[in-house]
Image (cartoon, rainbow, N blue to C red):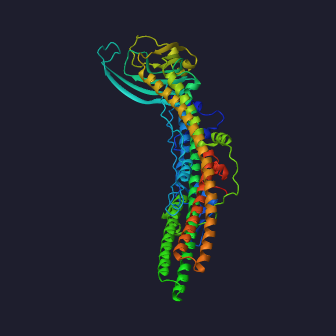
Amino acid sequence: MNKSCCAFLIALFACAAPAQESDSGFWHKLGAVYQAPEVPANRYQDTARLKTLMREGQLYLSLDDAIALAVENNLDVAVQRYLPVFAAADVLRTQSGALVRGLQLTVREGPPGVGGPSSPVLTGGTDNTNSQADVNLALGQITGIGSSPISPGSPIPRFDPNIVGQYGWIHNTTPQANEGSFGVPSLVTGTTVFNTGYVQGFSPGTQLAVTFNNTRHSLNAPNIDYNPYTAGSVGLTVTQPLLQGFGTATNKRFIRIARNNEKIADLTFQQQLVATVSAVMRLYYDLVSVNQDVEVKQQALKRAEALLENNRVQVEVGTLAPIEVVRAQAEVARSRQALTNSESLVFQQEVILKNFLSRRGTDDPEIRSARLVATDHIRIPDKEAPQNLEELVQQAFKNRPDYLQAVIQLDNARVALKGSKNALLPQLDLVGTVSNNGLAGEVNPLALPGSGAADQAFLGGYGTLMSQIFRRNYPDYGVFVQLNIPLRNRQARADMMRDSAQANQSELRLEQLKHQVQTEVEAAIIALQRARAGYDAARQTRVLQEQTLQAEQEKYSVGATTSFFLIQYQRDLAQARSDEVLAESLYAKAQTALERAVGIVLTRHNIEFDEAYNGQLRR
């Protein structure tokens, strides 16, 4: 019996295996389903690119280098690399018939930095408040509409096949109230059980159960004809829902949602890339700006020191009052303080940028001690290219990951709504069952003489039992319906109400996001135009202040003015140059904001999704 049972068990395993696979391939696959899938371990070391940019204790960075380092090493991006893994796990989970677990859709923005519009070094002298506000609006956090919890809806069959079984041996001793039933005062039974089955669900809602049951009994009773004997059956039961749970679309809805979530996961990762690349561009421009402002402050200090030296000479020869030396000394002290403030902001900006571009940040002693050298400068075109608002808005609808997420999430809400609607229906199942039975055993050696003759058809071993089963000597079959009508159905009605409202809300959110995209694109265009006008005005102001200072210096050299007015003009020029630096920075940020609002940041900087996901850019 054991060999035959094992052969049948192997046959059931083979039902679950692809027909084209060899035995070795099947057993390998069978063992693999009980092993945990491998998930790559976290990597805390920076990519080799960072070391190649280090020379003599300095980190030389072009804008492209900074973007590549951020994509490869930034921890916000590294965290989001797990989102596609979660989505793939949900697809695998729903293919088994389980519910989708969903995704957490969050995008982290980069740090503000210290050299932006809020920096005390780069403000004052001119009113740039409104321009800064416009740029910040266009650089605002652009996120999707988020995900909503999904109701379970109608139950889904388990698509993963299962082999079930009960195998063992039982000893029973049962006192008998009527000895005539079995001919003994207490019935002693030894039972060997070998029951196994194959269960699987299918997308139309069909549930299949194949059972193979056989039990061997050995008794101490003289009043039975066969002892020991084996009873067995092979059965097939098919259950098909006709109302609730019917249909492939209904039962594969979570697979569709999970596959949609794979797209959403990729879009969210892309959105994080956009946020990170935009942030590193802004931080890089800030680094360039604060370094340029240091140069402005150094030039101002040199002019103050030159004036001090000139005044000392004139005081010594008696052509200038001693108070002019004091004024010049005060201006030198003020200029040194301004330079110190600017240099400290450079150090702070470097710390922020180093932590943003590396996994260990300033925990690495080599990175902590390194100075950043920005090898690129902000370049502003001589003439502004025309911007077509309608074309840019349509481009944003095609490119922006947050808008594309919202479209897919609306589809998810509608798919979930179909499941909730199906759950409102009563349960009406068509059930068909068929089984073949058999019985085989030996003549009871304990039977009393003359107790009766055994039927020859039942005499034999396990082969006789299987012969009866497969010849269908003793068949059972039946067809019936199962009906379950809920009288109140409150849970299904509540889920339907919530999911209907959720789908409507998703439509409104999509429309809301559509308006937001249009507003952000238009605001970015306005900010760019205003930044361009501000830069042109700042450049012209700086040129005029240089000419004014030169004229004042000529007057001072012939004694036609005092050092008080010369110092004032020197300060005005320094402020004009700082304002020009600020205007360049605002223009560069406005350009970045427009690229982000339109959704072309990644393509503009040649960032491939697969390379970014793998954490290694080729360029």
- Left or right of 619: which side holds 494? left
Vertical relation: 254 (above or below) 55: above
Whole-percent x and y of residue 96? 54, 33
Note whether residue 84 is visible. Answer: yes
Vertical relation: 598 (above or below) 122: above
Note whether residue 27 is visible. Answer: no
Residue ID at (44%, 24%): 494
Which of the image's four quarters has the C terminus? bottom right
Residue ID at (56%, 34%): 511
Residue extending farthest to the bottom is: 317
| Count of numbered marks | 0
45 or 322, which is in the foreground?
322
Residue extending farthest to the front is: 560
Whole-percent x and y of residue 596? 60, 48
Whole-percent x and y of residue 213? 49, 24
285 or 368, which is in the foreground?
285
Vertical relation: 49 (above or below) 131: below
168 or 593, which is in the foreground?
593
Whole-percent x and y of residue 416? 53, 29
